[in-house]
Image: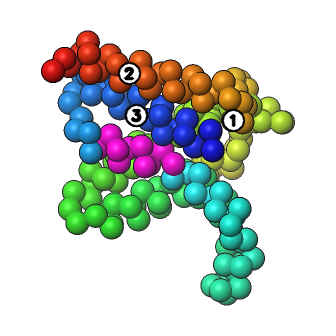
Amino acid sequence: MADLLSHVLLAYAGCTVASWYRPIPDRWIAVVMVGAILPDLNRITLLVANGTLEGILGTPFDFDALSTFGGGIVLAGIGAMVVADRHRRVFAALLAGVLSHYVIDGVKAYADGAAGAWLYPFTWARHPTPSLYVSSDPAVLTVAVSVAAIAFALDRFAIRPQ
């Protein structure tokens, strides 16, 4: 759970800082924050097993594909199709959130020193990671909360005072 909240908070902080250079309405920041959690939808396997869906659909199915770049593009496309208008802007905002998620996960610690194959369908290559943090470490959430709080305070009181 700390990993999921960290992605949302860091997406908020990144969009807030970006809005200092070009105004971004708050509703689009929220869409980017939703996009930041899309790659973690593969955790639905905690509730529903892959085999259950394979039986229902009658075809092989694996939720791990949702945590790849191709899965992020598909999920952002589905999210863009369910809105009434501004499909391209919603797709871009969701994809920006997905990319922020991958940037943050790209430096996470893995047991074998290589990140997951999140660049699929372009390549199965697993890049080496600097192993900066473990996703279950409470310090990661503390840093994310601190960064988001600083971005919020600067935005509300220094950059755009009311």
Please report contact status of discs 3 and 2: CB closer than 8 Å, yes or no.
yes
How far, Cα to Cα, is label 3 from label 2? 9 Å
Q: Residue at x 27, y 54 (%)?
A: 88
To which quarter of the image does residue 65 belong?
bottom right
Question: What amino acid is labelled 3 in the image?
Answer: Tyr
Q: Can residue 23 be seen from the camera position used here?
A: yes
Please determine whether, in this image, residue 60 is positioned above or below residue 134.
below
> Label 1 is placed on what type of residue?
Ser
The residue located at (56%, 51%) in the rendering is: 39
Q: Given the current orientation, which residue lies at the most extreme left position?
A: 162
Q: Residues within 10 Å of mark 3 (few under 14, many from 20)?
A: many
Residue linked to disc 1: 135
Give the answer, above or below, for where 6 lies relative to 59: above
Magenta part of the protein: which range?
A: 28-37
Q: Secondary structure at mark 1?
A: loop
**SS for dot 3:** helix
- How far is mark 1 from mark 2, CA to CA? 22 Å
Mark 2: which secondary structure?
helix
Instruction: Say which mark, if any, is on residue 151.
Output: 2
| Residue wearing tag 3 | 12
Does the segment drawn in magenta span residue 33? yes
